[in-house]
Amino acid sequence: VKMSQTAMLGASKGNEAARILGGEKKRQDDKNAHEAAKQAIMEKNKVSSFGSKFGTSKGDTMHTEYQQATIGLVTLENLKKTREELAKKEVILDHLNREAAIKAELEKQGAASKKRKTKVTKSSLSFAEDMDGDGVEEEEEVVVVKKRIVKNPNVNTAFLPDRERELQDIEKRKLLTEEWTKDQEKKKSGKLEITFSYWDGSGHRRSVTCNKGTNVGQFLEIARKSLMDEFRELRGCSSDNLLYVKEDLIIPQDMTFHYLIETKARGKSGPLFHFDVHEDVRTINDARIEKDESHAGKIVERHWYERNKHIFPASRWETYDPQKKWDKYTIHGSEVNGNGVK
């Protein structure tokens, strides 16, 4: 009896262990199946980027390219140059896309016109069977091509839309844009001698040579380096703390000499597109003819101007505004600081 009880106890323990192992295996299988289903759902809904799912527009592409090109420390000149290059690239891409669309439309119309030929079956007469010995009905296929309605060459159709003419206009605009860009680059690379006067209460006239495409900030740095051996106060001064005053107008540092020359800019006391010094040597003055005089531009420190802007000649100086026009030149009056403000 004891032996039988021991055998039954061992069998029950073996069944319990087998049931536990079976439950563990089932739970593990369920867990693996759940993980596999989870991974499959994640792979199905995986999106590498917002643009890969919804697509990117031309503006987003240009913005991304602009961000990549301006990573890190970038000078203002390089930033403007990058922006201009991207703008030109965007215009060229617009022209190319428009040209490709027009060509595709023309090819589509050409393919459709080829399918416009219709086939007409010749009908048999009622007495054809009597005339034909074998009684076989004959059919003949006749191809009828529709005549194309042409335009009257004597009528002016310039106001009508014409895809071929539009393609030609796009090509002409591209060529003119490239030609104008090359011409402007050639002009900007030309040499220009600028006569200036370092002003600290009295004038110290000097001259430097630079390209016409140089902006005022770059010119001030060149002038500062040429003056700092003689004027020690300029050694610890940056070009940002200097002002360039031409014909009683303070020229912004991001403006180029090429722009002043091309626009024939005018100042309060003379032209802004002459950078040498010359006087009107006519023996007889005529009030109807404007004097042709050019004065040396002044380079001053910003803190000197802030201390002395109420005193002539600094009281006449004001920031250059391209929208403001000066009809005639004056060398006195029209003060903007101190007494006599207008």
Image (tube, grey):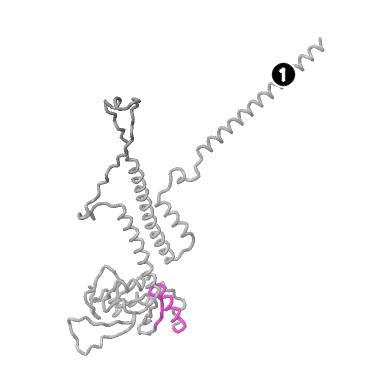
**Closer to the camera, 132 or 334?**
132
Image height of 77 relative to 307, above or below? above
The reply to whether residue 282 is visible in this rendering is: yes
Mark 1: secondary structure: helix
The N terminus lies in which quarter of the figure?
A: top right
At 45% from the left and 79% from the top, the residue drawn is 225
Q: Where is residue 33 in the image (x, y as percent from the top left)?
A: 59, 30
As displayed, is residue 128 above or below residue 216? above
Q: In this view, does 98 lie above or below 329?
A: above
At 42% from the left edge and 54% from the top edge, which residue is drawn?
Answer: 63
Residue 233 percent coordinates (x, y): 44, 80
**Along the line of sight, which residue is nearer the eye, 32 or 259?**
259
Q: Name the residue under label 1.
A: 15
Residue at the (23%, 76%) spot, across then down? 334
Residue in the picture at 30% in, 40% down: 144
The residue furthest top is 1
Q: What stretch is highlighted in magenta?
A: 207-230
Work out whether residue 214 can be spotted: no
Query: x%, y% of residue 22?
Result: 67, 23
> Is residue 215 highlighted in magenta?
yes
Foreground residue, 322 or 240? 322
Q: Residue 283 in the image: x percent, y percent?
A: 21, 90
**Residue 176 inside the magenta-drawn segment:** no
Label 1 crowding class (10 Å Cα cut-off): few <14, some 14-19, many 20+?
few
The amino acid at mark 1 is: Asn
State the image quarter where residue 168 is shown: bottom left
Say which quarter of the image contains residue 340. Answer: bottom left
